[in-house]
Structures are given as C-alpha cells and as structure tokens.
Image (cartoon, rainbow, N blue to C red):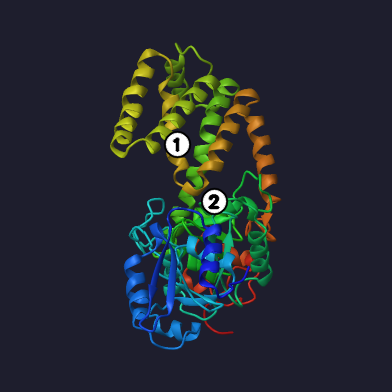
Amino acid sequence: MKITGKLDRDLGTLKQLLPAEDILTFDFVSVKGLAFTVLFADPITDKELLGEQVIRPLLHYDGKPTAEEVGRKITSPEKRTETDLAKLSEEVLAGNPVLLFEDMDEAIIVGTKKVFVRAIAEPSTDVAVKGPREGFIEDIKINTSLVRRRLKTPELKIEFLNVGRRSQTYVAVCYLEGTSVKQTVEEIKTKLEEIDLDIVPDSSYLTHFLASRPYSLLKQIGTTEKPDIFCAKIAEGRVGILVDGSPIALTAPYLLVEDFQSSEDYFVPPYRATFTRLLRLLALFVAIYLPAFYIAAQLFKLQLFPVKLLLTIAGSIRDIPFSPSLEMLLVLFVLEILNEASIRMPKYVGMALSVVGALVLGETAVSAGFVSTPAIIIIAFSGIGLYAVPNLIEVTSVVRLAMLLVAGSVGTYGIILLTGFILLYVVTTENFGTPVLAPFSPIVGRDLRDSIVKYNLGSLELRPRTLKSPNKRRLGNE
C-alpha cells in the first residue's frame, strides 16, 4: 500500500496498522503553513533528539514542499525516504520516527531510536589474562562497530537481514570478500531468509536452522562473545553472524578443535599454548571416563586397582547401602542439582549454597554412610574437568552420563564400544561441507600446526586448508 499524499488518509492507514496506545503523533506547522506530522513509538524513540534534529529545524522551514528539500533541513545523519505504508509501520515499531506532510507521496524515516545498552565489558565465560578484554553486548550496531574497528578493510562485508515474523530481528552476516567461501555465504543467507519463526530473541535460536543435522548431539555452529576471536575466525575464511539482542556471535563452519583453543593461546609462547590445550584435552577425558572406569573396575575388574588403593576403596564402601553404579549416579545427580541451583539463585545466596553443598552436605552424606568418599572425590574431579572446556559442557555431561550407564551394565567393554560409536558419529559429522573433526579426520598436515599443538606465528603463513578459503596466504607474499 503506497502513500497517497493526503495526510489525514495516510495517517489513518498507519493508525490502523499500528493501533497500539504507545504509538503517538505530533502535529506542527512551519512558518509558511506547511503541515507536518511525526509518527513515533513513545518508549523506544529519543524524543529530545527528535525535537532537536527534526521538529525545531522544520518549524522555521520556508522552502519548497518536497521530500528532497525537507530532508536537507533535517539535521539527523540517518534519514531516508519510503513510499510503502507497511514498511513505514515496521520502521516506527523499530523506533525510527516517520515524518509525513501534505501533498507528498513520500515519507521521511529519521534515525532517532533510543538505544538502551550496557557497557562493553569482558565476557564472564571467556576470561583472559592477556589480550583484549572487550566483549559483545546486546546492541547489533555496537557489535558491528567492534568488528569494523578490528577489520579496517573494504573487503569486510556486513549484510543485514530481518528474521522473525513478529520480532523482525536484525541479523548481520559478516565475511571477508575473497577470503570466505562464496557458496558458504550464500547458503547461510538462504537458510536465514527461509526461517519462518515468530520471534528470534537470541542467536541460539538460529543454530537449529543453520545446522545440517539439527538434532545432532554435537555443536555444528561455533560461538564466541569476544570481537577479537570473531574477527580472527572471519580472517581465516569463516562466516560470522551477529544477532540484535544477543551478545553471543555465531561462526561457521565449525571445527571441534576450536573449543580447545583460547584467545590467550595467541598471546603466549607456543609451548605454553600447546601445554594448556593438551591440559584441556586431558581434563575432558578425565571428566568423561574417570567415573565410568571407577565403576567398571569396582564391578568387573578389581585387579585394575593397585593393592593399597583397593584396600582403601574397600574400607570406604564397606557399609554403603547402594551399588557402585547407583551411588555414582546419586552423587552426580546431587552435583547437577547444586550446579543448577547455584547458577540461578541470587549471587550471594548461590555462593553460600555452593559452600553448604560442597562441604556440609558432602561431609554429612559420607558420615551417615550414604555415599563413599572416593565417589565424591571422583565426581568432584569430573565436574571440575568439564569446565576446562566450557563450550562443550552440554555435550560432555550427556556423554559422561552415558558412559556411567554402560560401565555399570557391561563394564569396560561397554565403555570401549560406546567410545567407538561416538568416534564414528563425530567422524561422519560435517557442516557446510567441512568435517567437524578436521584436521584430524581427514588428516590435514598443514592445519595440525594450529590444532592441539600450537606452532609459532611465522609457521602459520597459510590459512587453514580445511576451510577451503580462495585466499590461501595470510602472511607474506607468494
């Protein structure tokens, strides 16, 4: 539906499209008698800015009644014309006022949206001792500015889409032209445009639609809250996605090895980065397998324990009323409840709950003979190990539980069989044509230099072959 040029009729149509009580109008007349009407959403429009940049200049307007001439008088740097009434209503709901005036078949959209944002701070989930400490926030414009500040090149392309039938959430697709695979960019944009969802409040809503296996146990889309990591991944040939209202950015294609890397690894010597990555990998294996092997050894293979350790364990579990499997599952269940409660309760109460749960409840349970000391130690050690790789907690906690169940049922054979099944599943998983387990399966020798082992920067002159970037060299010339 187009603007007719009749102010009362166009305003009436917009009122029908926007019947909410917080959609207000302001009428005023210039010195030459030209009637104007501003339509705006009261809660999300900066009325002070609207008055200074739009209304005050036009009160003294004595020029020609054309959209071009009126637009020149408006001092706002964000302004454009539109003729479609439906699009004008969308802009009003987004916080951008619409200026209408008599006998003109165009309206002027003015960018005086009121933005409520928190300060840029270091993400609590990705703390680094060395390196940048900035993190994304919930405003997409500030987030794109953080990306632009780090990639000052015309090759950086940021394309905006609207996703969500009712929310009309802004989604920015970021990539380096000539570095990112064009097919991947187009595939991501196509998938985003095909999303038919009411509301998109967070970037995690998009991962289900972008993944090639929506119900996969594994992650298929990378996530980060830090602009430096986001830009580094784009520079390697990935495509980044920013969502308005979410501090978590998405990247694709995703490789499993990314979650064992940290931004701090690139600001410390290579040997230190290699050590910490191996430590994270070891902590993850211990977190998953230690409880399972403890149960399997206790039920089926007692000879796996050294004699002195076996005597200690035997003395601890002598009066425990539960089987080893049930005991371990009980302790794990209590740990998960304490974890959930401490996260979601008020900050200071949550700290007190952690102390009570870890010290008082644990010690009392051992004294009462409900659980053994080794079970609490092993589950506690396993829980700590999971947080060495925080981005994989959701996956590894499920795998740990599955390992416990098969260990209590079949023993070490069950652990080995389940490990083989998981390995087969991971090896066959890919997203956007890139194997998740690369560069280990398939083995890409050059990419192993920045996998679990970290080489120095001078050895990383080429971009990862796994990502198939058209621009292969990132250091020096051919």
**Does residue 391 sit above or below 54 in this rendering?**
above
Residue 166, disc: none
Q: Is residue 155 left or right of residue 229?
A: right
* Residue 44 can be seen, yes or no: yes
Q: Earlier in the sequence, mark 2 or mark 1?
A: 2
Q: In the image, residue 266 lies at what x, y percent?
A: 43, 65
Q: Percent from the top left, x then y, of residue 393?
A: 50, 43
Asked which secondary structure carries label 1, the reply is helix
Q: Which residue is mark 1?
A: 383
**Label 1 Cα neighbours within 10 Å, binned few <14 / some 14-19 / many ≥20:** many
Q: Return the residue nearer the eye: 151 or 371.
A: 151
Indicate whether 130 appears above or below 368.
below
Q: CA distance from mark 2 to mark 1?
A: 24 Å
Q: Residue at x 36, y 35 (%)?
A: 345
Q: If the image is split into quadrants, where does the C terminus sit?
A: bottom right
> If the image is split into quadrants, where does the N terminus sit?
bottom right
Residue, disc 2: 204
